[in-house]
Amino acid sequence: MWIYTWEAWAIFFLAVQIIHFAGTWWLYKAAGRKTWEAAVPVYNAYVLLKIIQRPTWWIVFLFLPILSPIMIIILWVDFIRCYGKRGWGEAILVIATLGFYIYYLNYVEKPAYTGPEDRKETLLSAILFAVVLATTIHTYFVQPMIIPTGSMENTLRIGDALFVSKNIYGTRIPNTPVAVPFADLFNRSLFIEKLQLPYARIPGWKKVEKNDIVVFNYPADSVYNPTDRKDNYVKRCVATPGDVIEIKNAELFINHEKFIPKKDAKIQYKYIIESKTQLSPKYLEEEFSLVSTDYAFGANENGFIYEFHGLSDEIFQALKNNSNIISANKLITPKDQTDRNIFPKDAPYNQDWYGPLTVPKKGMQIKLDIQNLADYIDIIETYENHDLEVSDGQLLMDGQPIENYTFQQDYYFMMGDNRHNSLDSRFWGFVPETHIVGQPFFLWANLNQLMGFEPKSGFHWERWFTVPNNGNPNKTSYLWIGAILLAIFLGWDFFFKKKKDK
C-alpha cells in the first residue's frame, strides 16, 4: 500500500518518533539530557544536533524530501561517534542495519558519552557537503536539463542545456521523498515507490501564462506512477485554464482569436517545395543551416520535389523567393482526415484541424454526459481520482448518478513550436497543475556535439550563455562574461592554495 495521504504520513511520522525514542532514550540520558527529550517530535532532533554539536539549523534538512535520508545517515554516524564508535566498521554497521545498531548500543553495550571527535575537513566530508548542497539546489531551486528532441526547434534546439527555475511557479514538494539524489538524470527507477507524499507546492510568484515555455512531467508516461518520476518535457503553453482552443488549417486560435507567439518563438511547419533544379546541399546548409536529415527529396516531371520536416516562416519565405522554385506549400492534413492518435479519443480531429475544446479550470462546472465524456474522462479518472462508468445509458461517478462535474485543479494545453514534429497536448491531452515543474531561464550551452544528438552541426557557440523565454528575438551570448568569471575563479583558487601552502 502506498503512503500518499497526509493522514497516512502523520501515522508514519509518529511511528518513526516512537522507534527513535525506543532506540535512543538511554543514550540521550548518557549525554546529560533528559529521557523525555528523545520522545518529543522535532524537539528531539534539535536535542540530537546539540548532542553531536552540529548546527541546529540542520534540522530543516531532516524534514526535506530527498535530503532527509542523506541527513539521517550522516547523523547516525555522527551520533555513534559521540559514544566512542569512530571506526569505519561501526559506521558501515549502523548504515547497513538502517540505524538499528543504535538499539544495540542503547540496550546492550550502553557506552559512555565521549562527545564528538575533533573534526577535520576530509575528502569524505567535502563530498557529503557537496552532495547535500547540490541536492538542495537541484530538488528545490534550479534543475538542469538537456533538450534531446526537436519538438521546440528552432526556438530551443536539440542539445540546448538549460537551467530550469522551480521557484517561479512555486517549488513542488517531491512525491517520492526517499530516492537517490539526481536519479532523474540517469536512472529514474532509484526511488521507493511505496513511500509517496501527496501533492504540495510552495507558492511561487506567478502562474503559468500563455506563451510561457514550460517544463512539466509528461502526463502520458506509463513507465512510472509517481508524478515526479515521469519524463520531463518542455513545450510552449498556448492555453490556460478556462481557455477555448481551436486549430483551423494549421492556424492556432485561443478564445476565437489568432494566437500570437512571443517574438523569439520560431514556429515551424512541414512544407512541400518544387524546384526546377536540385537545391545544393551546401546551399541549404550554409544559407539556412538545413542538413540532409531536415528534408527528403525526389524527382518528378517538373524537376525536384522537397519535403522539409520543419521550416520557420523566415526560412520558408527565403526559399520561396529562390528563382528556381516552382511552388511552395505548407503540408496541411485535410480536415476530413481523422487522426486516431489524437486527443480526445475518437474525436474527429487531426493536428491541423482541432477543437474547439475547453481547457478545464479549478472550480469550473460542466454538464457531464455521454456525449462529452471522452473529452474529460481521462483527467477525471487519472488526475482527480474518480471512477466513471456508463450503466443502462446512465453516467455514474463512483457508483452514483452524475449530471454536473466541478474540476478540482487547473489544467494547461501545451504545444511544441515545431508544430508538425511535436508530441504534445494534441495527442495526449491536458497538463495538470500537479505536473508543472518550472520555467527555463538560462541556456548555458549547446552540447549536441558532445551528446551525439546532432553531431553534424557543431556546438552552436552563439547559443551559449543566452536567455531563452524572454520574447527578445535577438539573443545576446554572454559567453565572454562566463569565460572571465571562470578565469577569475580559477586564478583566485590557485592564489589561495598557494598562499595556504606558504
Image: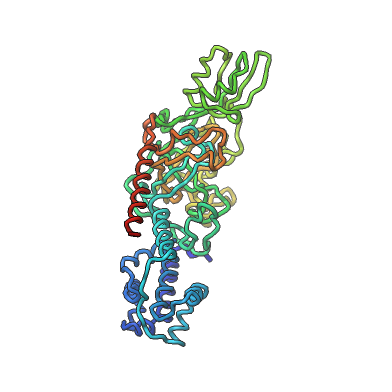
Quadrant housing the C terminus: bottom left
Q: Position of residue 342 (x, y in %)?
A: 57, 38
Q: Position of residue 55 (x, y in %)?
A: 31, 68
Residue at 47% across / 23% down in the picture? Answer: 314
Please state the total of marks drawn on the protein image.
0
Q: Quadrant of residue 333?
A: top right
User: Would you say residue 381 is visible in this rendering?
Assistant: no
304, above or below 207, in the image = above
123, above or below 391, in the image = below
Q: Position of residue 173 (x, y in %)?
A: 41, 57
Residue lying farthest front?
502
Foreground: 282 or 168? 282
Foreground: 469 or 410? 469
Foreground: 27 or 202? 27
462, above or below 112, in the image = above
The answer to whether 336 appears left or right of 215 in the picture is: right
Coloration of the structure image:
rainbow
Residue at 52% across / 73% down in the picture? Answer: 96
Q: Quadrant of residue 79?
A: bottom left
Residue at 54% across / 50% down in the picture? Answer: 395
Residue lying farthest top?
323
User: Would you say residue 339 is visible in this rendering?
Assistant: yes
Q: Position of residue 90 (x, y in %)?
A: 48, 77
The answer to whether 296 appears left or right of 196 in the picture is: right
